[in-house]
Amino acid sequence: MRLIEAQKVIDAVAKLCMDANRYLPEDVRQRFRDCAAAEDSPAAREIFRQLEENCQLAADSGLPLCQDTGLAVFFVELGDEVKIDGITLPQAINDGVRKGYEEGYLRKSSCDPLTRANLGDNTPAVIHLDIVQGDSLKISMMAKGGGAENMSRVTMLAPAQGWEGVRKFVIDRVAESGPNPCPPVIVGIGIGGTFERSAILSKKALMREIGDINPDPRLEEKEKALLEDINKLGIGPMGLGGKTTCLDVKIAMEPCHIASLPLAVNIQCHSSRHKEVIL
């Protein structure tokens, strides 16, 4: 059994929170450049220029990429030979979120759903935990903003609707969202499982790098086709028109009940903020 000190987890999580909100992943920034070069619209090119400038300003100054520094969402892979020494793993992660959002001067957005009273420390974090073999701990953090999250949906399709039903729901959801999620967006799609599992799949899919290849050839083809169809909508960067409404489409799929077809669409804004660490 390997012991990992709780403080090590707390410090690592705090750094993840700060870094994710300050430094946009290079795969996202590169896609900005590629899309800008392909745009015909002067307005779209200018938006991409501003997005790139914003990335650099955040990295240089230590200020967040966006004023909405999101709820802290974690996908955690805990080795079955690992034990956190001192407190539980969820406690350590939440302590790290408090530390990171306080020391990083990041906006705290967690509130009571009904009274809307701000809880003041951006906890509790949303933690999805998987137990895996081994003696390591992998923590992946996503700062999920409200604008894009509000445009996300879960539905239960009839099995007979099949792929065409999935395709229509996804494209309609992006079209209805318009400029609200701060496009160009990244679209995470969860197919199968159950009602709640499809939602988790759709969000986990957003942790993949832009431009990577889905290991399932069927899904790789469908991701490419959906990306093309979504970009034909013409919503464009920040809703001002252009070729780039979507930077990438990511699909995760699992088996489901014979009588249902769960589908979730989780939309991510252009500021796709996520980081990971392995302890």
Image (tube, rainbow, N blue to C red):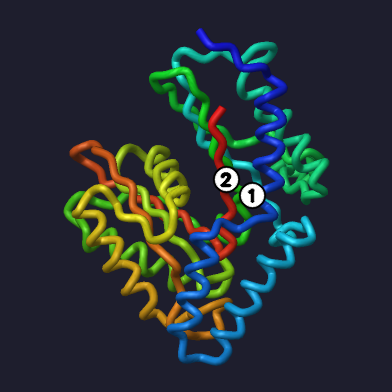
Please name the amino acid that badge 2 sits on: Lys
Please name the amino acid that badge 1 sits on: Ala
| Residue count near mark 2 (Cα–Cα under 10 Å), binned few <14, some 14–19, many ≥20 | many
**Residue beneath disc 2:** 275
Front residue of 262/12: it is 12
Q: Are marks 2 and 1 in contact (CB under 8 Å)?
A: yes
Tally the marks: 2
| Residue count near mark 1 (Cα–Cα under 10 Å), binned few <14, some 14–19, many ≥20 | many
From the viewer's perspective, is 271 left or right of 133?
Answer: right
Residue appearing at x 68%, y 52% in the figure: 21
Where residue 114 sits, quadrant-wise, is top right
From the viewer's perspective, is 7 left or right of 133?
Answer: right
SS assignment at label 1: helix
Residue 36: x %, y % from top left: 50, 80
Q: Which mark is residue 20?
A: 1
Front residue of 214/71: it is 214
